[in-house]
């Protein structure tokens, strides 16, 4: 949820659990492994006496209760700059690009009283820069996920919005189809150029996290580590996501563009109605105030605080 960081993948064929290790953690384990190997070569049996607890002392073992990233989704926030909502079912993908389920994500711009801005409000923002200096509030919802691998429990989502230093998280839920029922209101008071740039160029990354349920290796499985790795690689290849996350972001932005085009068309229709009314009244002029009201039918001219 920020700059890309290189990680090391660790997989236990004894428990079928996988983990991502930081560079520092991996290097520390590597030196411990080298020390154990040197003791083995020299006939020093102390290498076998690595304490089982705490697990961090054994470089080949990881805490089974460690939180693990199942995958992530990305959703474009560009629609917020035009006060449009987004509702998407996004594919959860892990670092290998394999699909690990679906996550429902929604966001809605809201008024000062907390009610959702709808098309019936006839609020239109032609240029997000016009929001600068005004308050903006929106509701982000994560209702549920579907198809989470059954080897995970205590599943939850977390993300970091704009300049927040801390992450925002849903509650933990167990099951392949967790119901999060999450809703959080975020505010920007007032909107700044930096915030508009954030909406235009940055996607919100939501991380789906859980703890793993160890699955012991089947009795009688005598495959070597090399054979197990080859089998695991083939399995991952068959689980590649059906949709590229970037394509999902583009689809969201396309929906926003279509909504803006529809709003523009509605303006033209209203202008035409104004002209037709003038013709019916045999008038050669139209009210500048009425025309201006149509063309500036946005949050400011409607007297609605988008906060």
Image: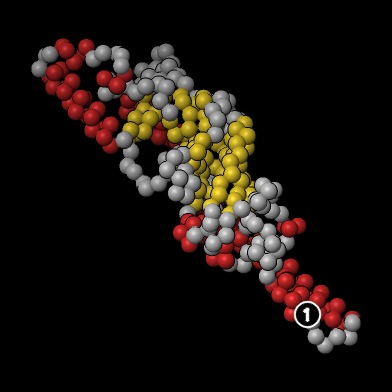
At mark 1, the secondary structure is loop
Q: Position of residue 189 (x, y in %)?
A: 54, 54
User: Which residue is nearer to you in this view: 303 or 63?
Assistant: 303
Q: Determine whether 284 is above or below 236 in the image.
A: below
Q: Is residue 43 toward the left or the right of residue 149 in the image?
A: left
User: Which residue is nearer to you in this view: 188 or 64?
Assistant: 188
The residue beneath circle 1 is 287
The residue lying at 26 percent from left, 20 percent from top is 57
The residue lying at 57 percent from left, 60 percent from top is 134
Residue closest to the far right: 281
Number of numbered discs = 1
Residue closest to the far bottom: 284
Q: Is residue 275 toward the left or the right of residue 176 in the image?
A: right
Quarter of the figure with residue 65: top left
| Quarter that holds the N terminus | top left
The reply to whether residue 124 is in sight is: no
Q: Is residue 44 toward the left or the right of residue 168 in the image?
A: left
The residue lying at 31 percent from left, 35 percent from top is 22
User: Which residue is nearer to you in this view: 111 or 159?
Assistant: 111
The residue lying at 48 percent from left, 41 percent from top is 159
Quarter of the figure with residue 13: top left
Q: Position of residue 46 (x, y in %)?
A: 16, 12
Q: Determine whether 13 is above or below 248 in the image.
A: above
The reply to whether residue 195 is in sight is: yes
Q: Position of residue 261 (x, y in %)?
A: 66, 66
Using a 10 Å C-alpha cutoff, classify the residue at mark 1 as few (fewer than 14 neighbours), some (14 to 19) or many (20 or more): few
Q: Position of residue 115 (x, y in %)?
A: 69, 48
User: Which residue is nearer to you in this view: 262 or 227?
Assistant: 262
């Amino acid at each position: 949820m920020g700059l890309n960081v290189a990680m090391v993948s660790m997989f236990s064929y004894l428990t079928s659990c996988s983990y991502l290790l930081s560079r520092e953690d991996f290097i520390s384990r590597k030196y411990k492994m080298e020390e154990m190997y040197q003791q083995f070569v020299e006939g020093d049996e102390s290498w076998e006496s690595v304490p089982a607890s705490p697990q961090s002392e054994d470089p080949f073992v990881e805490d089974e209760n460690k939180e693990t990233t199942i995958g992530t989704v990305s959703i474009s926030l560009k629609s917020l700059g035009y006060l449009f909502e987004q509702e998407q079912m996004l594919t959860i993908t892990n670092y290998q690009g394999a699909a690990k389920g679906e996550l429902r994500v929604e966001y809605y711009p809201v008024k000062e009283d907390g009610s959702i801005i709808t098309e019936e409000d006839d609020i239109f923002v032609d240029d997000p820069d016009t929001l600068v200096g005004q308050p903006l509030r929106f509701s982000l919802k994560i209702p549920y996920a579907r198809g989470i691998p059954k080897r995970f429990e205590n599943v939850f989502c977390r993300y970091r919005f704009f300049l927040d230093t801390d992450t925002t998280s849903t509650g933990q839920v167990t099951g392949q189809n967790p119901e999060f029922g999450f809703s959080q209101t975020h505010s920007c008071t007032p909107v700044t150029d930096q915030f508009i740039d954030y909406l235009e160029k940055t996607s919100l990354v939501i991380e789906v996290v859980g703890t793993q349920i160890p699955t012991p290796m089947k009795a009688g499985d005598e495959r070597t580590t090399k054979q197990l790795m080859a089998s695991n690689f083939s399995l991952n290849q068959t689980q590649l996501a059906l949709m590229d996350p970037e394509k999902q972001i583009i689809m969201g932005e396309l929906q926003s563009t279509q909504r803006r085009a529809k709003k523009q068309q509605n303006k033209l229709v209203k202008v035409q109605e104004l002209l037709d009314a003038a013709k019916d009244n045999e008038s050669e002029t139209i009210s500048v105030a009425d025309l201006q009201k149509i063309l500036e039918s946005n949050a400011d001219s409607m007297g609605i605080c988008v906060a």
